[in-house]
Each structure stands twice: as C-alpha cells, then as structure tokens.
Amino acid sequence: MAAYTINVNGEDQKVEVDPDTPILWVLRDHLQMIGTKFGCGIAQCGACTIHANGNAIRSCSLPISAVGDMKLTTIEGLSKEKDHPIQEAWLAHDVPQCGYCQAGQMMSAAALLNRNPSPTDEEISSAMNGNICRCGTYIRIHAAIKTASQKLS
Amino acid sequence: MKKEIPIISKIDRRSFLKIGTVGSAGILLGLGVRCTPSEKILDPAWFEPNVFVGLNEKGEVTIIAHRSEMGQAVRTSLPTIVADEMEADWSKVKVKQSVGDEKKYGNQNTDGSFTIRMFYEPMRKVGATAKLMLEQAAAKTWGVNVSECKAKNHKVSHSSGKSLTFGELAQAASELPVPDESLIKLKKQSEFKYIGKNQKIVDLADIVTGNTVYGMDAKIDGMKIAMISRCPVAGGKVKSFDKSEAEKVPGVLKVYQMEGVSFPTGFDKVLGGIVVVAENTWAAIKGREALKIDWEYGINRDYNTDSYNANLLKASNSNGTILRENGEVKKVLNKKGKVLDEVYTVPHLAHAQMEPPAALAYFDETGKCQIQAPTQNPRWVRDAIASQLEMDRENVIVNITLLGGGFGRKSKPDFVVEAAKIAKETGEKIKLIWTREDDIQHDFVNASGMHRIKVAIDENNKVTAWNQHGMIPSIGGTANPAAKQVGAGEMSQGMVDMPFDIPNLCLETHEAPTKTRVGWLRSVHNIHNAFAIHTMVDEIAEARGMDKVQNYLDLIGGDRIIPFDKMVTGFSNYGEDLANYPWDTARLKNVLKMVAEKANYGKSLPTGKAQGVTVHRSFLTYVACVIEVDLTEKGKIRIPEVHYAVDCGRVVNPDRVISQFEGGANFAASGALRSAITFKDGAVEQSNFHDYQVARMTDSPEKVFVHLVESDEKPTGVGEPPVPPFAPALGNAIFAALGKRIRALPIEADKLWA
Ligand code: FES
Ligand code: FES
C-alpha cells in the first residue's frame, strides 16, 4: 500500500492503494466513480477510456504509480451540464442501446476532436477502433462524431 | 429458447384493480396479465395486478417498467404505449424499474424477442382505463355526462370549453370504481400520438453523463468483492489447491472451495471452484491469480473442436432421425440430373455482452436474501436461489439493474446464485464479478452447427429434392444427459420451418453430444440454420442459372399458410399458436420483393463489388436482407450498404426498431467475420477480446437501411430477427463479387484472395 494524490476532474483526490492498482479500479472502488466501465481489463475494448492531459487512455491498463501529476478526466467530468458537443451529438442521434460502452466511446470521441476537430471518415473509424460496442451502435457513433465536429468547426 | 407461452387474459374485473394511491392523493391502477400456464400453477393468485400506472395530484404519471432493459428500449417503448392510450403528456411521465416479483408483475423473462408481442394490448388497455376514469371524474365534478368529456394531452375538456388537468382530477378519479371492460375504448391507429412515432430512450441523459447503474456498479456499504476460479472444463472439479500465496495478497480476506456440479451442469447451478473474497476488485484479481489449483477435468476433457467436427461429418453419411419428410428424397437424389452436395459449418459463439456477469447479494437483518443483478429473468433467479440455498422464495428479493447487454446470457441465473451462495457462506455483503476471461471461458455458448445439404435439380431445371443432415449439439444436453441430438423443437428455429415447396424433402438430425454449456444467444439455432440454408439457396440459383430473387420466389412457391404443426411432430412456433401467428409465405415473399426494390437489387456494380440476398422468418418476424460488399481493396471486406425489409406487424417505436437492426447487423457481422469459440481438451481456447474478436467500427456496415412494412398485424419482436439473414447474405455477396463460396464461418478474409 502507498498513498497517492491524483487529480481527477480538476480535484485532488487522496487514496491509499497498491502501487500497481489500475486507475480504473481506483476510480470505481476507491473514489466511487462508477461512470468509467470495466469491459476487458487488457486494453482491448475501450470501455474504461478516460483522458490523461486530454488524451484518451485505457484506465484498466494505467497503474496509479504511473499517474504522477497527470490531469485525469472521466465521463463525470466531461461537462457540467451535459453540453459537451459530444454529449449533445449523442443525445441528438439517440446513440446508445444498453449504454454500457458509451462512456468509453464518448471519451475516445472527445479526445479525437480535441486533437483533430474535423476528422475524415477514415480518421474517425481508426480512432474509434479500440472501442467495442457489442450492441453495434457504430453507425450512430460515427454519425454523432460528424455532427459534433461540424459544430466545432 | 426457453419457451413460455403468453396467455393474455381477457380483462375482467378481477384482473383489473385499483390498488392504492401515489403520494397523498391520486390513483394507482394495476392490470393483471396472465402469462404462462406454469405461472398459474406456481401462483394461485395469478389475477394479481402486474402492470402499473400511477397518477398524483401534481399530474405526474409513473409507469412501472417490469421488463429488463438491455438496449432494446423496453423501458421506453412499453410506457410509451400506456401514455398514448392515456392521453398523458410524455414529458410528465416517469419510468420506474420494478423489482423482480412475478406475482406482482407477471412474466419478466426478457428474452425470445417477445416483450412487445406479449404486452402491447395489455399496456394499451391499462392506459385507456386510466383515461376513462379521468373523464368520468371530470364528468362527476361538473355534473355532466361523461360522453361530453374528452381527455387530451394531460387534461380533460368539456364540450363547453372548460377543462381540468390530470393532476386536478387525480383525487376524484381515485375515488371511482374501475370501469367495466366493455366501456373501455382503444384508439384507432390514426389517433396514435406516440405509438408508431420515434421516442428517445428514457435513460439517454443518464447514459451520456455516466449516471447509470448496471449490475457491475451495484454497491452497498461494507460490500466485499468476490471472484471464483472455475475449472476450465465444464463440469470438472477441484482436485487440490494451495491458497497460501493468494492469502498473502494485501486485501484478500478469505479463500475457500465452493462445491459445484458435474456435467450436465444445467442452466442455473454453480460451477464451483475456488472463491476469493477481497476488500476490492484489484485484490480479488491478484489473489485469484496467485492460486495454485489442480483440476479433475471430468467427462468433457475429450472435447476437441477439430476431431468433433470430423466425426460429425462422417455421421452425415448415415441415416439420421427424420424430423420432416415428404416424397422420396433418396430415390430422387440417385436419379440422373444435377446433384449439389455441400457442407456448412458455424462455430460456437460467446455472448460477450459488454458488461460481464456481476451480481450483488447479501442477507438483511430479517434474513431475506437481497439481490441487485443485471438479470433477464428475475423469476428464475428467485427460484434458483430459493432451491439451492434452501430458503423460501418469498425471502429472495431481486432488484433488476440495467443490463450492459444480455443477448441471452443474462437469462441464466447461475452467476447470481454464485453471489448469493458466497454471501451466505461468508456472512458478508458480496459483489461477485466475472472478468472478461471468465465470461469467454465459462459462457453458455451458442450451439455450433454443421449441416450437409444435398439438392437435386432435374433436366427441366426444377428443384426436385432437398435432403438436409443437421449435426448440432442440443441446448437440452446442457441439463439432460439423454439429449444427445437436437429435435424438432430446437430445429423449429429455421430448419424444419423451411418454407420451400419442394416435392421430395427430408430433414434429419444426427447425434452430436453436448460437451460444454450450450445456451441461447441472440437468434440461437437460426444462426447456423439460416447460414446453411440460404447459402445453399444461392448455390441452387447459380446451378440453375437463375436470378437470385426469382430463384427464391420459385422455391417458396405460391401464397399459402403453412401448417408446420401438422407436418412436424414437436414443432414450436416460438411458443405461439400458429392460428394466432401463422406462417405466411405471402408476407415472406413481400419482404423479399420489397428489399430487392429498395436496394435496387441487380444494379450494375464495378468489379469487386456485388450484392447478396436472403430472406428468413424468425421469432415471428419476416426479414429480407440485401448486402453490398466491396472487395476492391485486397484483404479488406467492406460493407458499404445493408438493406433490410422488415415485417414485424405494428411498430411501436420505429427508431428503436431501426436501431435494433443496425445493432443486429453488427452482431451478425461479428459472427460472420470475426468470432469463434473453439475447444481443446475440453477448455475454451479463447480468453478475451484479442482472440475472441467481435466487430469493431472498421468492420461495421457503413449504412444500414431499414424498410418497415406498414402493417396492422399483431406486433412481433425485433431483437433477434436481424441476425439470421445477415451472414448468408454477406457470403452470397462475396461469391457474386469474387466467385469464392463461403461455407464456413467466420469468413477467413485473408484466404479470399489466395
Ligand atoms: S476495460 Fe480497459 S480497455 Fe477494456
Ligand atoms: S451500447 Fe451496448 S455495448 Fe455499446
């Protein structure tokens, strides 16, 4: 066990955990932030995607000992009023089915638009390929990212 | 599919009750829907109300959703139906999830694509009754005749122009008796306000903000996390184990052995193994990794996919058990003329719903077992816990969370029973978590399917004989050692209900022992049956030199209602009487013609691009499919367009029907392009998404067009029907583009250009 202070959604959080504990479980078990989901544990599905300094990362595969002073953002911190362009586009397209993968999808999509506000169809598909949706909402995810991107540019 | 036959009762006064108030004033109406004959036996009080709508003096309407939500939008669609008939304003409607209590809520088993099919009419009646009571309350208040009062958009108006809101009328309405059924008038289709219109899902805002609670998210103060190390071979057990290293992992609280069942395991029994209970999930994962276990693998240790399939193929040379026969197939096959003889194989598939199984269980101060779980079937959870923990089922309380996908996996209660057992054995509040590895390696996989089909074409280019040998492990074999091959009941999913008008026909199945837990997965046996049959249909068209659609229409023959129940002993029409849901070739042909027209089937496409077509009825819904494939880039299978024509009777929420088809196409694309569960020495060879692959965005069809037949027929389900016609349509398109015939799934893309 070791003590860590990590910055999540703009707030410093103190936890005492094993150094190899993935951030996913720190969020879910220790900080009671359950918006970030567990899907595979080995960086294959994207359900656990969060931002570290604005970039999409798989929180299941990032141990807390490697976080340092990174600024982490989770789905709970994406916006205060569900008015992030990605959230608005998700609402407009009624993207989710079961919804379980969607926090990860939205975090990946938001990170994509952070670094590339007008991605091509191919750039969207390759950026989103790490996020599985077993309900198969890919067509709407793709369309919603287009909508959000138009709004941004 | 576990069959439960819905019997919607006639509403009599006993089944329609006013059962109380909501808040300080207001009404709460309950309607009894009788569901299954078995329920009648289990629950003598089966006229208990099970569908609820409440209205309080603030005008807020509460509709209780009693079915499990897993992406198919039942939490939205069922309340929509009530609100429409009630003339409630949708923005004032709240949806609450019911607990699992079949005495109260009737059948809650959410699978078999039957939620809308079963509850469409009762939900309308509950809404219409509430509306009438509000009109009666207004009439009484004003001292006028009820025929002069009309409810519309959350208020009741009098012909003179005065009006009262629903909220203002709630108290008065609650004092009225429930009107007789004969007074209840349902809307005409043209009067629908919400039914047939798009409605966004009720959980949308919570999903986009990360505020939803799935089974994996359930929690309670003081809760511990449990994981189980299970034998890699279904039905095996622990020989010996060493827990010393596991117990050294910080946070691990307890390690012990749980007894399990041998094979056949059944559907609701625990597999057993070594349980690790820990303070948190990471400690449980690490503790489990540190275990050393010696297993006794049991009778399934000889299950090897390759040799198993080779044996099945040999069996197809002999005579099987005949499920359906007319004419003299074997004689005709030996005559002169063309004979096609091909083998089609589809592997086992895992559900791999995004949320692995998880459940919270604890015993409260009164000794009741409290459950929070993502279950498709709370009733079965209750029964299984009651019988395996030897307690009264009244003391098992099942709260249904959202489901992070189900696809049939979460209709089995095994994982919830595991949680309850650990809670009992440790005295702790337990959340049991399956990792993805647990999920892939211990699933109730879909049956694998091998079919050998022989077809005779005579000198007049007529198809004169069809002989099909099915070698398919039975779902029944998971529970019953005597079920060594599939029978007509299971093969009613797309094989024995083959609608072709062929003079000599013989459909038979062979022994194919069940060697792992086989269950039902989104469209079940239809997956391999449809793949084999509709690929062969395409091969027939090639052999006859016929247009693919014309060939289908010729095989289907004239418009008729096919009495499969008279032709096949043990036939099952998805649990429905054929008299109520007939097998209608006119509807089948109609969707085929519709899809051909909408997709512009036969349009000219550049080299490397082509279309494939199929048509299939499953779960009482008729679906035709045209897929356009683009193989111009070597090594890459692109799917620019999928067209579905769908006849599912009346449509409640068109956008959610469309989304089921978009998603169903992707689910089917996984099976067609990526997924296979294989066995070596009895154990599943795959373990996570790197080797059990599913469709990702780059595999996804780029566009899915859904063409809905306008229909006044009874509504039927759409969760499963998108899947069966997809893979064979894709294979047929690939043949049209490249001349390579696809007879095995998943398609090996790299070999297409070899
Ligand atoms: S849970 Fe992290 S990528 Fe799947
Ligand atoms: S919405 Fe269900 S997994 Fe994506």
Image: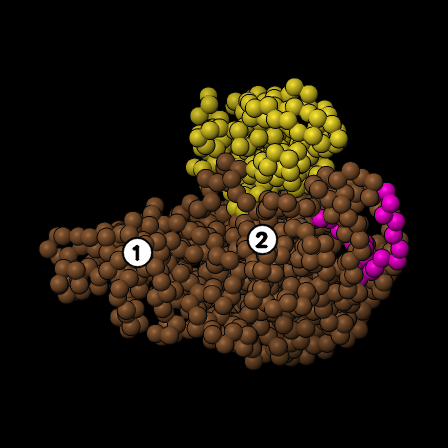
Q: Amino acid at mark 2?
A: Gln
Q: Quadrant of the C terminus of chain B?
A: top right
Dot 1 falls on which chain? B
The colour with which the image depicts chain B is brown
Q: Which residues are magenta?
A: B226-246
Dot 2 falls on which chain? B
> Does residue B562 appear in the picture of this structure?
no
Q: Are marks 1 and 2 on the same chain?
A: yes
The colour with which the image depicts chain A is yellow
Q: Where on the picture, by quarter, is residue A122?
A: top right
- Of helix, strand and loop, which one carries label 2? strand
Q: Is residue B84 above or below residue B337?
A: above
Q: Is mark 1 within 8 Å of ligand 2?
A: no
Q: Which mark is residue A111?
A: none
Name the residue carrying label 1. B25
Q: Label 1: few (<14), some or many (≥20) within 10 Å?
A: some
